[in-house]
Image (cartoon, helix red, strand yellow):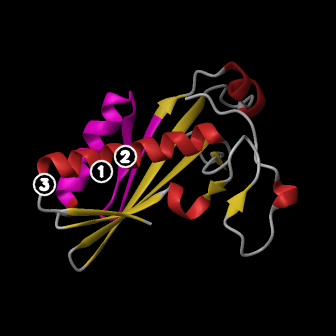
Amino acid sequence: MLITGCANYDDWEPGVTQFKGFGDNLDLRSTTKMEVVGVGKDDIHGILYSIMSFKGYDLEDESNSQIRFYKRNSDFWTNALLSSRYDGKVYDRVTINTFKIRDTIKIQVGVAVITNRGSAFEQVTEMTAQSQEVHDFTKGILTEIKENVEEHFPESEVVWN
């Protein structure tokens, strides 16, 4: 995943959920969240494994409410700007939070760039809503979840937040 560009933070005001920059305004609330009704959490996790492994990501960690995937970042500029002397490798991390409330699974996707992965010196640079490309990536993951749920569980309901 290539991560470039930045939002214009001069246009941000407290309580506002949109940034101007990189083309269209990004609505931060609707880009990274959705709710799925009528599907089990294990089924959602299975769909996530399938989607992320197809994109070349490996499973990093899993708990009852969070799944993290990682992949080596291949972008020259990201590696040049964020790598360290300790470890010159930079990784993309996708964190997907899944919370079950009654029969609803709430899903939220976050993207970060990681240096010194797995060490005491690990540094996390959150990238969610930083550029149109990250917006499109997170929206794409949620869209794939929606398509898989609708295909395999036609009686379910998917709601964008």
Is 43 part of what is drawn in magenta? Answer: yes
Instruction: Name the image quarter holding residue 98.
Output: bottom left
Is 2 part of what is drawn in magenta? Answer: no
**Residue carrying label 1:** 146
Taking the spot 61% from the left edge, 59% from the top edge, the residue there is 27
Magenta range? 42-70
**Which amino acid, mark 1?**
Lys
Which part of the image, by quadrant, shows the N terminus? top right
Taking the spot 37% from the left edge, 46% from the top edge, the residue there is 143
Which part of the image, by quadrant, shows the C terminus? bottom left
**Which amino acid, mark 3?**
Phe
Query: Local crowd at mark 3 within 10 Å, few (<14), some, or many (≥20)?
Result: few
Choose the circle earlier in sequence order: 1 or 3.
Answer: 1
Q: Position of residue 109 (x, y in %)?
A: 46, 54
Q: Position of residue 131 (x, y in %)?
A: 67, 42
Instruction: Name the image quarter holding residue 160.
Output: bottom left
Taking the spot 73% from the left edge, 24% from the top edge, the residue there is 77
Residue 85 visible within the image: yes
**SS at circle 1:** helix
- Above or below, 158 relative to 25: below
**Residue carrying label 2:** 143
**Residue carrying label 3:** 153
Query: Local crowd at mark 2 within 10 Å, few (<14), some, or many (≥20)?
Result: some
Residue that lies at the very extreme toward the bottom in this rendered image: 102
Q: Are marks 3 and 2 in contact (CB under 8 Å)?
A: no
Q: Position of residue 66 (x, y in %)?
A: 38, 59
Q: Position of residue 155 (x, y in %)?
A: 11, 61
Count of number-bearing discs: 3
